[in-house]
Image (cartoon, grey):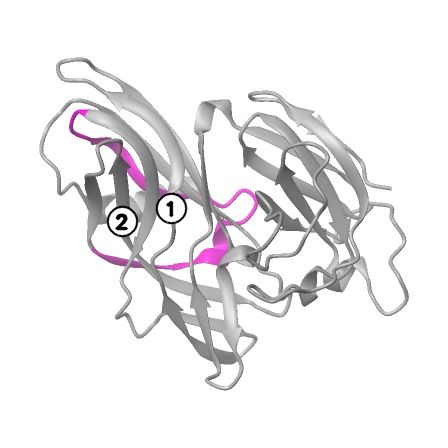
Amino acid sequence: MNTSFRKAVLLPAAVLLLGGCDARLTVDLNTNPPADPAITRVDASLRGLDFRKADGSSDTLEFRAGELVDLLDLQDAGTFRLFTDETLPAGRYTGVRLLFDEAEDDNVVARGVVESPLLLQEGAYAAVDFQVEDDESSDESISLVLDLRQSLSYEDAADEYTLTPALRAVPTGAAARIEGTVAAACPTGTSLADGGAVYLYAGNGVTPDDVDGAEAEPYATTRVRVDGAAPSYALGLLQAGRYTLALTCRGNEDERGASDDLGFCSVVDVEVGEREVLRRDLN
């Protein structure tokens, strides 16, 4: 998705609902793909952002009206510019989360031509840390990443999806990236095309686990891409730090909230610095 096109269309629809002129804030939104490779569209009506402050209060930035966005368009190089050079009042900001228009009938998940309703729930705050002080100018640029594998769940009986946002935030200018090729052989009955996925966990020496709300939960996930000369993966917009990287050929079986044995392999420790692009092939 062309970023400049997103800006031209979306910026006129955004309006600040806060007073003050103490800081300038720019926020972009990206996504990581869902577990189900058959999902072709995730339409959700975005309404803005809710910021948590250290004193327990909160401030919001909202659009004039909800913006219906296909969240799958925001993978890889796709970017949704939420706000540009908006202002925030003084305070220390410690968290941010997405606001949705939950009543929008067009909130749907599509698998080909088949659409199912999408229920939107309030998510936890993603950690941020910046200070706005009176009479002092500052500029903050934040990239948010909505991990759809960790956010989407499906209720078979009701034929409906629920999106509970699993969001991470990183200062845009400091964001790191880990990428590489994948040469691991998948067990019989699985494939990189259907279930190849890479999970990233905060800290070294972590035992990988699925998205079940227990034990180790991933910091970021992505699918293995098989449309190039060789299978590959890329995890962008990461905080600098130490991580555990793990591959599975059964990522399409990961159901949010359920305990699934994903048969992780190629588990390695990595460390990435600010603005670094780390190459780590998985064999």
Indicate left or right for 24 with 177 as reference: left
Give the Cα distance between marks 2 and 1: 15 Å
Residue depicted at x 56% and y 63%? 256
Above or below, 119 relative to 12:
below
Precedes in sequence: disc 2 or disc 1: 1
Q: Amino acid at mark 2?
A: Gly
Dot 1 surroundings within 10 Å: few (below 14), some, or many (20 or more)?
some
Q: Return the residue found at the far left.
A: 19
Relative image position of residue 244 (x, y in whole percent): 70, 37
Q: Which residue is mark 2?
A: 48
Q: Nearer the viewer, residue 107 or 167?
A: 167
Q: Nearer the viewer, residue 152 or 233?
A: 152
Magenta range is 65-90
Q: Which residue is mark 1?
A: 6
Relative image position of residue 274 (x, y in whole percent): 56, 20
Relative image position of residue 11 (x, y in whole percent): 26, 43
Quadrant that contains the C terminus: top right
Magenta stretch containing residue 82, yes or no?
A: yes
Dot 2 surroundings within 10 Å: few (below 14), some, or many (20 or more)?
many
Q: Nearer the viewer, residue 54 or 188?
A: 54
Q: Nearer the viewer, residue 1 or 20?
A: 20
Residue depicted at x 79% and y 57%? 263
Indicate left or right for 236 with 246 as reference: left
Q: Return the residue found at the far bottom.
A: 157
